[in-house]
Amino acid sequence: MKPVIIVDSGGANLASLRYALRRLGAGAEVSADARTIRRAARVLLPGVGAAACAMRRLNAFGLTAALPTLRQPVLGVCLGMQLLFERSEEGHTKCLGILPSTVRGLEAAPGRPVPHMGWNTLRPLKPDPLLEGVTEGDYAYFVHSYSAPITQDTLASAEYGKPLSAVVRRKNFWGTQFHPERSADTGALILRNFLRL
């Protein structure tokens, strides 16, 4: 059976993603090798930290050209989701360009600090196999300072001062702004759905 590959993007959530997948009975390897990633059954693109740093790392391994050409299911997680877009305001960074639009910084306000850190509810907007069983009001765990706008590719939204994309999809590329590996039953359900795609 072809493995699930977690892209070695330098994010601190690599081990927790592997553990979450192992709990679901799926083995996963961590790799930054383009040939290994192309042969995978499914690919996860995690990320924690700055968009510019993550893109430099992907570029150094030749993955900025390889990742957009993948045909198997790909799931970007947190910063990994943001990297699927054209650009990020964070460092004026050119990203992978798989989804149109620009990721922009969250605006702090009294009682609404940045980063957005903690549990927030999801609002499904479109049916999708990744969200099978997820209902409005289900909680997911977020840690981020930048967000993607609501677009035609948004499958579910969350609210933090204004609506933002919580789950996106374009063709075989999905993304979650939250951390499914930290999102208890909701996150486990989404990862299980991803493994069934």
Image (spheres, rainbow, N blue to C red):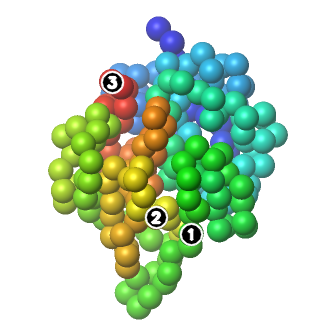
- In which quadrant of the rendered view does residue 156 lie? bottom left
Q: Which label is found at residue 145?
A: none
Provide the residue designation for mark 3: 196
| Of the image marks 2 and 3, the number of the one nearer the N terminus | 2
Residue 122 position within the rendered picture, expressed as x and y whole percent measured from the top left: 27, 58
The residue closer to the viewer here, 66 or 116, is 66
Residue type, mark 2 in image: Pro
Residue type, mark 3 in image: Arg
Give the Cα distance between marks 1 and 2.
Answer: 8 Å
* Residue lying furthest right: 60
* Side (left or right) of 153 relative to 193: right
Give the Cα distance between marks 1 and 3.
Answer: 32 Å
Q: Residues within 10 Å of mark 1 (few under 14, many from 20)?
A: some
Q: Residues within 10 Å of mark 3 (few under 14, many from 20)?
A: few
Question: In what element is the residue under mark 3?
Answer: helix
Camera sees residue 83: no
Question: In what element is the residue under mark 2?
Answer: loop
Q: Vertically, is 88 above or below 133?
A: below
Provide the residue designation for mark 1: 104
* Side (left or right) of 49 relative to 151: right
For the residues labelled 1 and 2, say whether their Cβ atoms are less than 8 Å apart.
Answer: yes
Give the Cα distance between marks 2 and 3.
Answer: 28 Å
For the residues labelled 1 and 3, say whether their Cβ atoms are less than 8 Å apart.
Answer: no
- In which quadrant of the rendered view does residue 103 lie? bottom right
Provide the residue designation for mark 2: 149
Q: Quadrant of the C terminus?
A: top left
Q: Residue at x 48, y 37 (%)?
A: 173
Residue 181 position within the rendered picture, expressed as x and y whole percent measured from the top left: 40, 44
Residue type, mark 1 in image: Arg
